[in-house]
Amino acid sequence: ERSNQPIKNQLGTFVIKYLMEIITSNSDNDAGRNVIWQHLQVPIIQMLFHKHINLGDILKGLRAELRKKGKVTREQIVRNRDSIMWLLLQYMSAGMVAMIR
């Protein structure tokens, strides 16, 4: 587990950067944004579920990026909030199903 830590950190940093790219994109194409979120959910959930990345680290990193002044507008956060919450809900649901089996 310890030997994989640098890889986990790099992968976590990549996920945070990718999420921020989606959130901060100025595209008004909501359909395109939804497709990106849908395709992104599966690999992120799998990485979380198999412990390739740590949810706490992702949330802390995402929070730090979102708090930087001038980086993200309120409109961008609102526009992506539901997708982020849906991603978290699916991860929690997958964990519950795994516990039941």
Image (tube, helix red, strand yellow):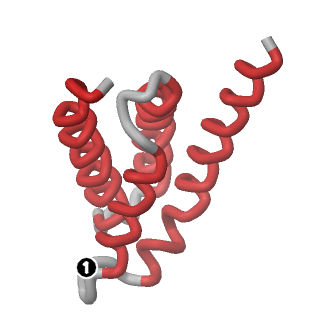
Q: Is residue 43 above or below residue 12?
A: above
Vertical order, 11 against 42 (above or below): below
Location of residue 27 (image quadrant):
bottom left
- Horizontal side, residue 48 vs residue 83: left or right: left
Q: Which residue is mark 1?
A: 71
Residue 64 spot, x, y in % from top left: 33, 72
Q: Quadrant of residue 60?
A: bottom left
The image quadrant of residue 14 is: top left
Q: Is residue 91 left or right of residue 24?
A: right
Which residue reaches farthest right? 100
Identity of the residue furthest to the bottom in this view = 69
* Front residue of 87 and 48: 48
* Residue at image coords 34%, 53%: 19
User: Count the marks: how many?
Assistant: 1
Is residue 63 left or right of 89 when viewed as pictured? left
The location of residue 8, given as percent across then percent down, is 27, 35
Looking at the image, which residue is at 67% across and 39% down? 92
Residue at the spot x=47%, y=46% of the render? 55
